[in-house]
Image (spheres, rainbow, N blue to C red):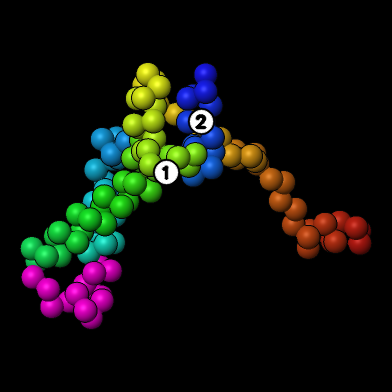
Amino acid sequence: YEAARDAAMQIAAINPLYLSQEVVPAEDLEKEKNIIIAQIKEDPKNASKPDAIIEKMVGGKINKFYEQNCLLQQEFVKDDSFKVGAYLESKGVKLINFVRFEKGEGLEKKEDNFADEVASMIK
């Protein structure tokens, strides 16, 4: 029970997008790589570096992306000496999936057209 509650608190607080790096869609990963490569090449310090070095830099930044966006690779907020996956494993828990709801998400807001409202009041 405690491990499940801790995992739920981690999800609510840190808002991971994916369970683990294995489930990150290929198109999301490719998009992230393209952004990273563009950032590296725009930096004057890195523009002249060989492609092999840039590839290693991309790999490091992709690992950082996983640590920020994949629940099981995130540092555990209650004890940063653990990753969430290692913490859950130490408690004998295997997390298969999660769904995060945000307050107000999915609610449609009524949109009034102020000009129409004024016009109807004048009539």
The image shows residue 90 at horizontal and vertical percentages of 36, 25
Residue at the far bottom: name it.
Answer: 44
Location of residue 70 by image quarter: top left
Q: Is disc 1 placed on a helix, strand or loop? A: loop
Q: Earlier in the sequence, mark 1 or mark 2?
A: 2
The amino acid at mark 1 is: Asp
**Location of mark 2 (residue):** 6
The image shows residue 13 at horizontal and vertical percentages of 54, 42
Mark 1 and mark 2: span between their CA atoms? Answer: 13 Å
Looking at the rendering, the stretch of residues picked out in magenta corresponds to: 38-50
Q: Is disc 2 placed on a helix, strand or loop? A: helix
Q: Residue at x 39, y 30 (%)?
A: 87
Confirm whether residue 18 shows in the render.
no
Q: Residue at x 22, y 56 (%)?
A: 60
Q: Pick whichever, 12 or 74, lies toward us.
A: 74
**Location of mark 1 (residue):** 80
- Report the side of 87 relative to 56 (left or right): right
Q: Main secondary structure of the magenta part?
A: loop
**Is 2 situated above or below 108?**
above
